[in-house]
Image (cartoon, rainbow, N blue to C red):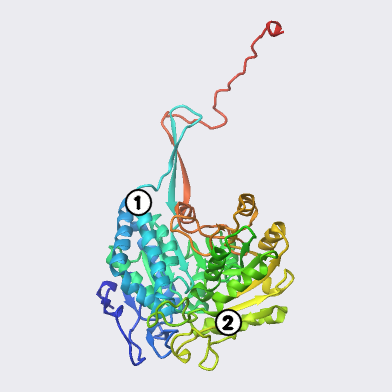
Amino acid sequence: MPHILEAGFEIINYENPNGSPSIKGYNIINGQLKESSNSETFESINPAILDDCLGNFPLSTKQDVEDALHAARDAFESWSSTPPPTRGQIIGNMGRLLMEYKDDVVRVETREIGKTLKESAGSVQEAIDTCLFFQSEGRRLYGQTVNSELPNKELFTYRRPLGVCGIINASNFPAAVPFWKMIPAIMCGNTCVWKSPQDAPLLSFVLTRIMHEAGLPDGVINLIHGKGSGAGQHLVDAVDEGLVDKISFTGSTSVGKMIGEICGRNLVSCSLELGGKNPLVVMPSADLDNAVEGAYWAAFGTAGQRCTSLGNLIIHEEIYDEFLDKFLDKVEHTMIGDSMRFEDVLYGPMISERYAKDFLRDLEICESSGATKIWGKGAISEDNKPINFQGDPSEGVYMWPHVYSDVTEDMECFHEEIFGPVVTIVKASDFDHALHLANASPYGLSSACYTNDRLEAYRFKSEIRAGMTGINNSTTGAEAHLPFGGVKNSGNGTRESGIWVIESYSYWHAVNDELSGKLQLAQMDVDEIHIEEAEVDYSSLA
């Protein structure tokens, strides 16, 4: 089979007017293009135009996954011994190539998962920023020199790579999130097997192609395609077989708990970035127009398909009616459509038909909980569409924005994440009540509070139980050098992005270098220091 660098970049600009499969996709194992061992494939479909097939990709088997893991294991010794500044230079090359190809990569992401061009550009820029940040970390992969309690002895600490990392990310941020994971992983000297998101295999292939063009050696990052229940499960099961030294997963809490159990019984490290039911509190002192803008974007940006999307909108009763009027006015005029063809749309289709079916199923939680639906009519069709829908809804999988009010803490919809364009609204009697409600869900990923009262702002950021908080900003958005992750059911305490993520992909190695030529035992051969009591005449102080 040909090497990955022989795969041309004409695939990026391919326009497919008749819906026939356009690309024959491959796994990438040890730099080679590979079909699945049983030749089975699946299609990648444009959710905005369902008869637009981007290509066929391997439905990877257990054997394919194990081949990728062995390739990563074989590449580990050479890559881990490569000087970190050299690894950083290759990562910097990746960032510069992504800048060069950015417009084309953005179009692939939008076409494959339906994000708006602006949001896809943000996702790709996040990958670029991550590369440029970690390029310099190659010269700062610091350990420490530590003073010894014994003479003629030196103590050191070093960061060491873990080994082979299994990488599994969701489809909603198919450029940013895998780079959050793999760039620090390879920076630390690890090698990776990346299971691409089921709904973004072409973009994953393009990104891996760019990594190799940047000078990444064969076997350092290996790409396998397939479903979560297939290739993804095989990758996780390989932990039990001793083939994986680290799993990094972004996805649902239920799957994350399963992965955590398998890693735990094998004493294997795992990073789990999971779901959220993110609260946004609005207090009377807030700039209401600014708060409406933040809540609207947090709820419906990316069609609500972010783990940081707004879940519970908590409004103080004093401003409840005024805020809700302003908020609903924006919701009713939401521009929805395919941003490849229409400008100024807030969001496009659901990521795939699978995501759309799950969303419609989960909306029933709001109905059965007894919440009051004040906006939204399910799936968009020609006979059932909002006033500002652009184009022909029958071409893709589009959803109305949904708003449910009269939600209380005892309702199921208050606690459950619903992945899509929906927000549940809760009324708070005062700040303490609002803070209680913000902390009451089982999740703790992102959070926000709109207030111009300094004490309220201080108390919120001090007392909220969440991994991330915005003050007078939405629940969404993080910069590439800030730690990303949550608490409670939103994760296991690990973080992505910034210098903090290095802890997730390395371990500390302590070394003592004995120079005295004899055995010296810490805590036993240390000279005892005697404290002598001085005689002091206190009479002069009387």
Q: Position of residue 386 (x, y in %)?
A: 53, 85
Q: Which residue is mark 2?
A: 358
Q: CA distance from mark 2 to mark 1?
A: 42 Å
**Residue at image coords 57%, 76%:** 329
Compared across the picture, whether 197 is left or right of 93 comes to right
Compared across the picture, whether 77 is left or right of 151 comes to left
Amino acid type at mark 1: Ser
Q: Which residue is mark 1?
A: 136
Q: Nearer the viewer, residue 201 or 166?
A: 201
Compared across the picture, whether 76 is left or right of 317 comes to left
The quadrant holding residue 438 is bottom right
Give whichever of discs 2 and 1 has the lower sequence position: 1
Amino acid type at mark 2: Asp
Asked which secondary structure carries label 2, the reply is: helix
The reply to whether callout 2 and callout 1 are in contact (CB within 8 Å) is no
**Residue at image coords 55%, 91%:** 384
Asked which secondary structure carries label 1, the reply is: helix
Q: Position of residue 23 (x, y in %)?
A: 33, 84
Within 10 Å of disc 1 (Cα), the crowding (few <14, some 14-19, many 20+) is some
Report the residue that reaches farthest toward the front. 322
Q: Quadrant of the N terminus?
A: bottom left
**Residue at image coords 30%, 55%:** 89
Q: Position of residue 487 (x, y in %)?
A: 60, 59
Q: Nearer the viewer, residue 471 or 367?
A: 471
Q: Nearer the viewer, residue 530 or 341?
A: 341
Residue 397's place in the image compared with 290, above or below, is below
